[in-house]
Image (cartoon, grey):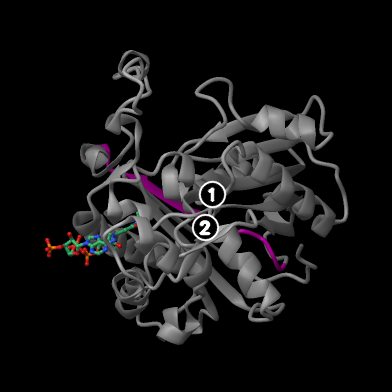
Amino acid sequence: MSRAAVLAGLGTYVPPRVVTNDDLSRDMDTSDEWIRSRTGIAQRHWAQPGTATGDLAVEAGERALKSAGSGDVDLVVVATTTPDHPCPATAPDVAHRLGLNAVAAYDIAAVCSGFVYAMASAAGAIAAGIAERVLVIGAETYSTILNPADRTTSVIFGDGAGAVVLRAGEPSEPGALLGHDLGSDGSLKDLIIVPAGGSRHPAGAAAESGARPAETYFHMEGKPVFRHAVTRMAASSRAILDRAGWAPESVDWFVGHQANVRILHAVADQLGMARGRTVVNLDRVGNTSAASIPLALGDAASRGLLTPGDRVLMSAFGGGLTWGSTALVWPRIVTG
Ligand code: COA
């Protein structure tokens, strides 16, 4: 009998500072009307300067462990685009700060698909008997990589963290992850990129001029990314629905990566799902990249949308390019 990864706890955290579209319009040539109509976003949370991704990850991690009813895990996986340092990974420090000393801990870098990749990695560790209980965290501080001179990206992204505990269980249990579909297309890596700061273009030299070099900021080609996001998320969702044996119209909630409400609706349309079955929280938190799916799950749970027995489809798309999907029947858990 194969071992499945079963959802046992969920916790979320966003930093307290709310930045509205009107706040952004004061320093940037944009407007509440443009941002809302093009993306669906009304506000986002940005951490105070000095707050790192690991700080948000610890908050969400604590809540997820409490939700799971036990601080007992043997692996911590942190999905992030904005690690605390280029080296070492953020996960070991997060594990240490959560009091989980000596557990295995590593980061996953798959940009906005990071959380779905991290859940697949955790499920693989559980299936292989490497881990019994895994804390999977998606956490981001995009405010640290957004270029204030680039209105096309600055209005979209927010900071936050979401975490789940996955435990070993039976494939037939509520909460069991019903397979994973993952993919990538590196030929399109330049569509979503922080050009400098890695080994191809170290950031140090340019920083001597005093001003932060533009290449150290996040860059995205919005239009093609939009098109690829719809195509890839729809195809990946279909692959997972086939594996689960679920008809699209039998899905209770589509929890897609919260990039743009028009993307979510386009994917729902392609799948033949009612748009009303799409969970949307990007209006309040923006695109939080690797934190997006767990924050959307937490939001849906706290609003009472997710009830035990509901069929939940999750799908994400992001830089790399990368994409991935998974699905589960919502279990009886108390979320934090
Ligand atoms: N405020 C006001 N105007 C803006 C603006 C802003 N924040 N950003 C861009 N514009 C302008 C552009 O300059 C352009 O002006 P022009 O017509 O005079 O040239 C116009 O608005 C249209 O820009 P465009 O980029 O074509 O808009 P769009 O409808 O494609 O929407 C995005 C832009 C970024 C919202 C959209 O492409 C998108 O959501 N892409 C995917 C984003 C994403 O996060 N995907 C997931 C991957 S992680």
Ligand 1 in which quarter: bottom left
Q: Tell me the amino acid under the disc marked 1.
A: Phe
In the rendered structure, does residue 273 fall within the stretch colored magenta?
no
Residue 271 locus on image (x, y percent): 35, 76
- The answer to whether one can see residue 178 in this image is no
Q: Residue at x 52, y 58 (%)?
A: 292
Q: Residue at x 37, y 22 (%)?
A: 198
The image shows residue 104, relative to residue 71, as above or below, that is above
**Labels 1 and 2 touching (C-beta < 8 A):** yes
* Side of 16 where 159 appears, left or right: left
The mark nearer the N terminus, 1 or 2, is 1
Residue 134 locus on image (x, y percent): 72, 43
Magenta residue span: 174-186
- The answer to whether one can see residue 159 in this image is yes
* Side of 9 where 2 appears, left or right: left
The image shows residue 3, relative to residue 86, as above or below, that is below
Query: Which circle marks residue 115 in the picture?
Result: 1
The residue wearing badge 2 is 292
Location of residue 287 by image quarter: bottom left
Location of residue 84 by image quarter: top right
